[in-house]
Image (cartoon, helix red, strand yellow):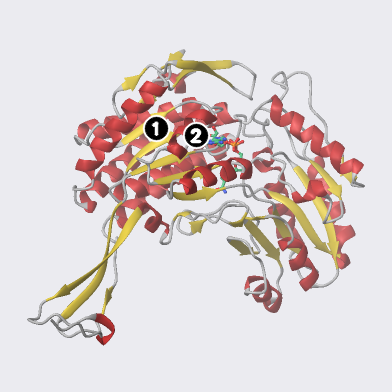
Amino acid sequence: MEFLKELGIQSHNAGAATGADWLPGKGTHIRSYSPVNGALIATVGSTGRDEYETVLRTAAAAFEQWRLVPAPQRGEVVRQIGEALRGKKDALGRLVSFEMGKSLQEGWGEVQEMIDICDFAVGLSRQLYGLTMHSERPQHRMYEQWHPLGITGIISAFNFPVAVWSWNAMLALVCGDVCVWKPSEKTPLSAIACQRIIAEVFTRNQVPEGACCVINGGREVGQWLAEDGRVPLVSATGSTAMGKAVGVTVAARLGRCLLELGGNNAIIISQHADLDMALIGSVFGAAGTAGQRCTTTRRLIIHEAVYDNFKERLVKAYGQLSIGDPLDERNHVGPLIDKAAVKMYEEAIAACKEQGGHFVVEGSVLAGAGYESGCYVRPCIAEVGADYPVVQTETFAPILYLIKYSRLEEAIAIQNNVPQGLSSAIMTTDLREAERFLSAAGSDCGIANVNIGTSGAEIGGAFGGEKETGGGRESGSDAWKAYMRRQTNTINYGTRLPLAQGIRFDI
Ligand code: NAD
């Protein structure tokens, strides 16, 4: 496989890096199997406790220097990372696709997202603005400025093996922070490839060793980061269960958390919807990436007047989905990440049936030629009650639930009545409906779209969600503020010392 060679992936790879320098990874080896064909791609060391200490010490030392580099110069390094990623887009996209199982188009799309965030961060490096305020005291000036925070710990999930890291790391770098990345143990090779790409840029620019580190390993390595008082910010992407554990640990030491957790996303399909558009948005949103996006469409809330018609069209469209090797561009749906995910899919289907769900497209695990990995499943659709326990939970697989509604307020209530609050959408050509959905009495999610599905966000907006999705925001808009500390400065250039609020203190 040429792309592995191009990215410097060997049959066995060191597990941790402080930048250009690699540490073997003294813990248990991680074996990375491709869900595409079940083949062992390569092994990776996992970070030992002493290696973790080396990484943290190197990162802390790098921060002392990096925070003093002017932000636009930090941006110039990130610009070069973007260039390096452009050069490796094909190979890295292929690795992401092969290791995670998403389509090649989406693998390349993920690398494009990395390039986009680099471009965004370069501009941001000249726009880390603070406000100035008018002081209530004469001959005083008051303003705020943003300083680098320190080490940003990044814990990432398997389903976006590289993009989510770059959302965090590129912003953190221009903000003057250094990064320690704990990638998913299910996709360690994609992380190693990224580290090799940026290390070249860092060496060329004499960026201090430790500015961007990687520590491969399982959840215990993530826990070390969460517990570590030297890490002021932990940005963690993954399941709500993980977020609850990390959130509590970081809060116990009064650290900062940026949590990007599970979703349970719905599209409301109104009687005023353009049903052709609604169909594409729904099928891509529910079956794309084999249902393994945090923004995957899990629920369709359909108006009773168009319910039967739309259900029929959905069933027909699902019949046309081709499932198979995601690197073959003719296929729409690739595999789930591993057999544990397949088991969760089967369990959710069984639970749905038990709770009264009626499947209009049956799910099954595929076997035979092309499906040897045992990770390919058929996307399925069930008619359900909105309150079924299985509908309230996120199953990371292509299971789509259909719910009928008669009034918009009812549809919005159904859409909001789940523990998660990541992404939401309405399909309608009625302006009043759209605006009600977007109003304060509308969707309670971090993302609310009109005539667009729930998945496929752009980097320019702040990304994240409410409730059990964790409340974090990363990527665009002013998400950069999470990576910096705000300092309010008041300067007295007068000859007297008046106190605020007119308080007198005569001596
Ligand atoms: P996961 O929670 O199993 O693992 C995510 C990461 O957390 C991994 O690196 C894992 O090693 C680490 N981890 C797990 N438990 C930990 C603990 N107690 N302490 C520290 N680290 C720990 O999630 P996954 O299966 O890799 O990814 C799928 C989940 O991620 C889904 O729920 C999905 O919705 C969510 N996700 C959310 C977003 C978002 O932006 N909201 C984006 C991508 C994925």
> What SS does tag 1 mark?
loop
> What SS does tag 2 mark?
helix
In the picture of the structure, the residue carrying the numbered disc 2 is: 223
Q: Nearer the viewer, residue 427 or 232?
A: 232
Q: Where 203 falls versus 374 (above or below)? A: below
Furthest-left residue in view?
Answer: 495
Residue 84 lies in quadrant: top left
In the picture of the structure, the residue carrying the numbered disc 1 is: 88
What's the residue at 82%, 72% (across, down)?
407
Q: Where 388 falls versus 340 (above or below)? A: below
User: Can residue 210 be spotted in the picture?
Assistant: no
What's the residue at 24%, 71% (across, down)?
143
Q: Which of 368 and 155 is in front in this view?
A: 155
**Amino acid bearing label 2:** Gln
Q: Is mark 2 within 8 Å of ligand 1?
A: yes
Q: Nearer the viewer, mark 2 or mark 1?
A: 2
Q: Where 114 falls versus 185 (above or below)? A: below
Ligand 1's quadrant: top right
In the figure, is residue 212 to the left or right of 310? left
In the figure, is residue 160 to the left or right of 210? right
Residue 275 position in % (x across, y down): 76, 61
Query: How busy is the neighbourhood of tag 2: few (under 14 within 10 Å), some, or many (20 plus)?
Result: some
**Amino acid bearing label 1:** Lys
What's the residue at 57%, 52% (across, down)?
470
Query: How busy is the neighbourhood of tag 1: few (under 14 within 10 Å), some, or many (20 plus)?
Result: some
In the figure, is residue 311 to the left or right of 500? right
Q: Which of 80 and 165 is in front in this view?
A: 165
User: Can residue 377 be spotted in the picture?
Assistant: yes
